Image: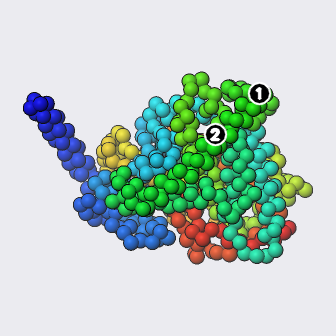
Amino acid sequence: MFYALVIFGVILLWVLKNHMKWRKEILNHIEKIDGPKAYPFIGTLYLFFGVKRSDVYKTICTTAEQYKPVFRTWTKSTPEVHIMKPEHIEIVLRSSVLITKGKIYELIRPWLGEGLLISTGAKWFQRRKMITPAFHFRILEHYMEVFVEKSKQLVNILESKSNGEIFDIYPYITHCALDIICETAMGVSVNAMDDVTGNSYVDSLYRASELIIRRRFTPWYHSNLYYLFPEGKEFQKHLNVLHGFTSKVIGDRKQILKDNPNKKINPTFDDMLTSSKKRLSFLDLLLSANETIPDKDIREEVDTFMFEGHDTTTAGICWSLFLIGNNQDVQGKVYEELKQILGDKKCPESISDLSDLKYLECCIKEALRIYPSVPFISRKVTEDIEINGYKIPKGVYCNLHIHKVHRDPEIYPDPMKFDPDRFLPENTAKRHPYAYVPFSAGPRNCIGQKFAMYEEKTILAAILTSYKITTIDSQSTVNELAELIMRPEQGVRIRLQKR
Ligand code: HEM
């Protein structure tokens, strides 16, 4: 017993000594970088104490503005470096080594587990390779049918709102996007659009996202003791709803496959490409992988794709509507293009139709520039890097401010002006390739970016062909909530007029 204690003591001392050496080295480098004063135990988290939810983003922007282009903060005793210049962002995103996600994702892990967004190393690599075919261009052609059907249904539902009343279109788009991701990627109909006033999955998703951000800025919530606080218990309650919904989706799809002998249970990529198997989905790939994927892992991937696959596109569509409805000249040009390309059709019906809607695409890109659905991403620095002359040592976290690079006046003059022409080929040619990264870039870029663009274009084209929209709030009055997803706090209040 005595010897065991001595050995344990020696190991502990050795670990502590190495840890202190590592911290001293980190401190040496990190403290060369400017940033707000840090205090013991809380680091720089005090910046957010007592700040209203609606003001958190302003606080982040003020801090970034004060210390740009590179600054450091401390989350308790963990240093984080913040970057916002294209050339710095490129260093992180291009790396094939820096693929481990940052601190904030630890708070998302109870929800999304080790799904594609959060996993790293060999697990991430293998899954990415396996899932990529489900988002191949040829598969998306089959999904187009769903985009069109759901967009037309949405346009019909909106008919009851076209009497000049002011209403928030956000929940309508959310439910449409949820129907689309379930029917395409999961192969299951959830008919969320049948009731846009209440959906427990959507309600729990919004509240859980809010609670994750509150936890991030509240030091005493960081450990697992969080679950003993009322807020932690509430978070757990919402997790149960979110996981319950995705478990049901998986159960429903398994049942459909079991009941329908014509559907091949173990599709290959080639099967997925043949038209007779057109509704074989991403979920089918997981359910029938060669080496069996544990049920828990399937749930985590479904949770990830369900969230990433609808919340991001909803925000993108809604910010596009917000801006188009605020800029009638742009709306006029979009309508002209729709008439010219679609003729009498009320909705694009093929990918070729979508490809011809070039001005609409510029509008979507410009909306994603000003209001990127994912405003920040974060990485763990797993090998030393150099940014702006500073050495950022291994072990530090690095936050990439997508929203700041997109609003940099040196790259985009008058950055808050909605000007879709910025995305005409002649205007993008000379821009730094990392000056516009709404879908991230490099090995961990968004796997669903083509899916997202097709879905956004179809829904927007369908709405704008049938209705003229007028936005009620302006860019100066809208409150941006830049949390996991960037949303307008008060939704998108509009008026519709039938064309
Ligand atoms: C406008 C819509 C979208 C935007 C702006 C967007 C943006 C992003 C960004 C910035 C990342 C990198 C996140 C990070 O590094 O933390 C990402 C990753 C990801 N996105 Fe998207 N996304 C969109 C739509 C979609 C859709 C429709 C899907 C699925 C159908 C999807 C699935 C994913 C997944 C699974 C990842 C993780 C990929 C990996 O790490 O290998 N996204 N997305």
The location of residue 348, given as percent across then percent down, is: 81, 51
Cα separation between marks 1 and 2: 18 Å
The part of the image, by quadrant, that contains residue 66 is bottom left
The location of residue 10, given as percent across then percent down, is: 13, 35
Looking at the rendered image, the quarter that the C terminus falls into is bottom right
Looking at the rendered image, the quarter that the N terminus falls into is top left
Q: Is residue 325 visible?
A: yes
Q: Is mark 2 within 8 Å of ligand 1?
A: no
**Three-letter amino acid code of the residue under disc 2:** Ile
What residue is shown at x 19% (from left), y 38% (from top)? 15
Question: Residue reaching furthest top?
Answer: 290
Question: Residue reaching furthest left?
Answer: 2
Render colour scheme: rainbow
Q: Which residue is mark 2?
A: 250
273 with respect to 240 (left or right): right
Q: Is residue 71 visible?
A: no
Q: Nearer the viewer, residue 192 or 313?
A: 192
Around disc 1, counting alpha carbons within 10 Å, would you say few (fewer than 14), some (14 to 19), or many (20 or more)?
few
Question: Tag on residue 261?
Answer: 1
**Three-letter amino acid code of the residue under disc 1:** Pro
Work out whether 165 lies above or below 107.
Answer: below
Work out whether 139 lies above or below 238.
Answer: above
